[in-house]
Amino acid sequence: MKKVSPLFILVLALGVFGIITTEMSIVGVLPQIAQKFAISTSQAGLLVSIFALVVAISGPFLILLVSGINRKLLLLTAIFIFVISNIIYAYTTHFEVMLIFRILPAALHPIFFSIALVTAAKLVPPEKSNQAVTKVFMGITVGFALGVPLTSYLAEQFSLEIAFLFGAIVNAFAFIGILILLPSMPVKEKMSFGKQISVLRKPGLWLNIAAVVFIFAAMFSVYSYFAEYLSRVTYMNGTLISVMLLIFGVIMIAGNSLFGVFLQKSIVNTVISFPILYLIVYLLVYNLGSYFIPMIFMVFIWGIVHSGGLIVGQTWLISEAKEAPEFGNSLFVSFSNLGITLGTSIGGWVISQLGIHQLIWSGLIFSLLSLLLIVIKIKFFSSSNQLSLSN
């Protein structure tokens, strides 16, 4: 294959950053969105859950459906829709229109993500493929670390329009970079549908999938309302909440590396420890939520633990799908987003029925459910004790 500019890997990472920023920046501006459209916070939370639900439903099936289409065309189409959607977010005055333009990019999210990882590996020498994939994958963490809090800051200091236009500009730069730097990539061999879906016959995989769903539900049932919780329980102002989101995200970068080290030492011990750590964090957040200074410290601890969910969940699921890692990754994208949908929806219901402070109970319950499934898997499926780290 024709060699491309080294900048292309960074362009792919920028595209992933733009997509994650588009998906998750809503979390940091839910109060402003609720105010703009005169709706409740739980209604505004639909913007998070509907996106995740569409990703969950469309993921593996759309990837197989478009397996014969030129990869460059798919990447350009996906990122272009993200540009348009952010512009719509900035200027629409109808909540229903905004919901529609959460559905369209969500359908293309797993396509861009999966193709970007494969493309990064193909366009560099084999010995550098893992490094290239890691750089693209970092776009997710940096999206949480910088994209989400920066969007929140722009909305607080300027306006929602400026905040969403930032997302449009980031994705536009990625579009231009892909257009210029990426050669045409027609597909020479289609994926075998039957070979990949055969992993679904493994009962251990379904236990891992269920655990991943509950892990992400535990994470996002509370994190999706992070800004609202700090605003109404801890009484932080918008500017400080933006700072807390930034701190949370930056800590995630370090925490992600930390959990990576733990997984190298023992997948089983790390996976078991994750929901236990989250139970501890949520108990502390529940009891310290109304105390200003302690909650600032808790944001640091919360961010470290939260960062592990992505790599822990991906490693746990892929450990049972080594025969078809690409399809396994698409399953991870889909079911992790199903967990986000479930968590955000239940979290919104708890807020509407019991109040914002009781939101923490949704995270506690989902953490317990994920821990239960992990223990069942390890106890009754001996292969879990022979797991090895695999991407």
Image (tube, rainbow, N blue to C red):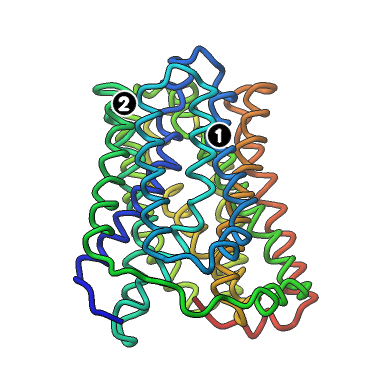
Front disc: 2 or 1: 2
Mark 1 element type:
helix
Instruction: Indicate which disc, 2 or 1, sits on the residue closer to the N terminus.
Output: 2
x then y, percent, for residue 41: 54, 22
Identify the residue shown where x is 61% and y is 61%.
Answer: 60
Residue 227 image point, x, y percent: 44, 30
- Relative height, residue 68 to residue 99 (above, below): below
Left/right of residue 27 with respect to residue 216 in the rendered view: left
Task: Name the quadrant of the N terminus.
Answer: bottom left
Residue 47: mark:
none
Q: Amino acid at mark 2?
A: Ala
Characterize the local packing of mark 1: few (<14), some (14-19) or many (20 or more) Cα atoms within 10 angstroms: few
State the residue in front, 271 or 128: 128
Q: Which mark is residue 155?
A: 2
Circle 2: element type:
helix
Q: Quadrant of residue 86?
A: top left
Q: How many residues crowd mark 2 within 10 Å: few (<14), some (14–19), many (20+)?
A: many
Query: Is 151 situated above or below 73?
Result: above
Q: Callout 1, which amino acid?
A: Asn
Tell me residue 273's x, y (percent).
Answer: 58, 63
Q: Label 2, label 1: how many angstroms apart (C-alpha)?
A: 30 Å
Q: Is residue 80 above or below residue 321?
A: above
Q: Write the residue at 25% across / 23% down.
A: 157
> In the figure, residue 333 lies in which quadrant?
bottom right
Q: What is the count of numbered marks?
A: 2
Identified at 39% across, 55% down, the residue is 140
Tell me the residue at 64%/35% (across/down): 345
Q: Position of residue 367 (x, y in %)?
A: 65, 51
Say if 53 sits above or below 325 in the image: above
Give me the disc on residue 287. 1
